[in-house]
Amino acid sequence: WGTPIPMIHCSSCGIVPVPYEDLPVVLPLELQFEYGARSPLAEAPSFYTVPCPRCQQPARRETDTMDTFVDSSWYFERYTSPQANDGPFAVHAVDYWMPVDLYIGGIEHAVLHLLYARFWTKVLRDLGLVKYDEPFMRLLTQGMVCMETLWCAQHEWLFPTQVRDGKCVECGRVVTVGRMEKMSKSKHNVVDPDEMIRKYGADTTRLFILFAAPPERDLDWNDQGVEGCYRFLNRVWRMVRRIVGHTTALPPDPAALSAASGAALALRRKTHQTIQKVTEDIQERLHLNTAVAAIMELINQLYQFAVEEVQDAPTQHALREAAEATTLLLSPFTPHIAEDLWQQLGHQDSILRQPWPSYDPTLTQEDEVTVVIQVNGRVRSRLKAPASIAEDDLREAALRHERIQEWIAGKAIRKVIVVPQKLVNIVVA
């Protein structure tokens, strides 16, 4: 049952609240539950038989209870001070911790729990118990994990293991493959995580779930996607191991890093761009899938190096920097392999104790950018330009572009809109 309603029914005084000193109303534990419409509290005289707090005549305690949504409407306040015993929560703890920075829940919460939680918060605010108007600062509505369903006319919903060559293994009937639906035990379209972990490991299973779709979108389970994540982690393992073997005795040397040029400088730029993107994707956008994709791009660039043949110190240090950054960036997604690689990179402390990697803003800027040129909003060409090019120079370069000259010849230029480093739109009549 839910929370007791602290009221007492008296034939003389009417409905009387339970005195403050008698709160909370404690529910009995010895009752027997039976299916039916009546609460077992209504069959327990030891619970409902009480004297009226006002006239002391025999009265009856309320046996209905509040919906469990009442509990879930303020549990987050209670979490701030679970040991408080002189009230629902400690006000100073709520002032420190609340409101919640990020609430993650399913779409079904939006109409019920979230609505009630907001209402309850405003009641607490009006009572002077809290100082905020909203319990949650930010909401992320997560998607569902979906899997195709399998149906047999005789045996109904089937597990994949009950199907062979498109037929039910029990009766031999052709199985109907249904659409992707939310994983449900009743429809037998669930994937056993224990089996996935035994086959691929916990890190691969975690990585696929986080990489396969944005958190707010439904995820269509795909075994090939799991295989792809498994192969990627093996590529990470092999590359970091190669770099470790080639740079084991390499002492830190900031001067050597600063002297990087050519391919080494390009790798350093990619490393710092990746740190920036993963940081922003996690902290600001919660796009975990694109964060993983950025790490994959960094690994692809690392594989352009013949690591064992690299002899110059700047490139060796750039490889080492990229390997450490990759390991740190992967640690929230794949903590086990990241911990192992971090130790192999020569670090004594756990990777969990390391600060999040920082990036050098000067290295995240490209030397050259591709600028789109439009005429009346339609793309007509592109040009390469220095990233530091001034707006006026970019405008002139676009107007002088050979292909653009053909599109604007004999026409009056009404306006030229410049978006630095990205786009020039020439409006003509």
Image (tube, helix red, strand yellow):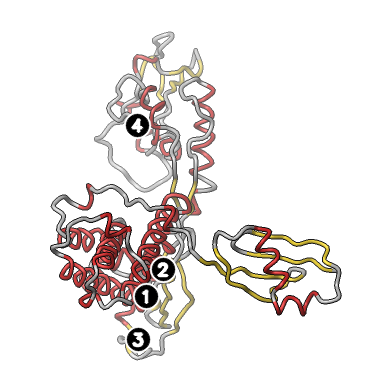
User: Which element is circle 4 on?
Assistant: loop
Q: Give the image location of residue 213, x and y in percent.
A: 44, 66
Q: Give the image location of residue 114, x and y in percent.
A: 50, 43
User: Which element is circle 3 on?
Assistant: strand
Location of mark 3 (residue)? 168
The amino acid type found where label 1 is placed reads Gly
Task: Tell me the mark number nearer the camera, choosing from 4 and 2.
Answer: 2
Location of mark 2 (residue)? 212
Asked if the residues shown at circle 1 and circle 4 are in contact, with their CB atoms under 8 angstroms apart, the answer is no
Query: Which of pointers 1 and 3 lies earlier in the amino acid sequence?
Result: 3
Task: Tell me the mark number nearer the camera, choosing from 2 and 3.
Answer: 2
Location of mark 4 (residue)? 80
Write down the quadrant of residue 308 in the picture.
Answer: bottom left
Location of mark 1 (residue)? 225
For residue 306, above or below residue 340: below
The alpha-carbon separation of the residues under discs 4 and 2 comes to: 34 Å
Asked if the residues shown at circle 1 and circle 2 are in contact, with their CB atoms under 8 angstroms apart, the answer is yes
Query: Which of pointers 3 and 4 lies earlier in the amino acid sequence?
Result: 4
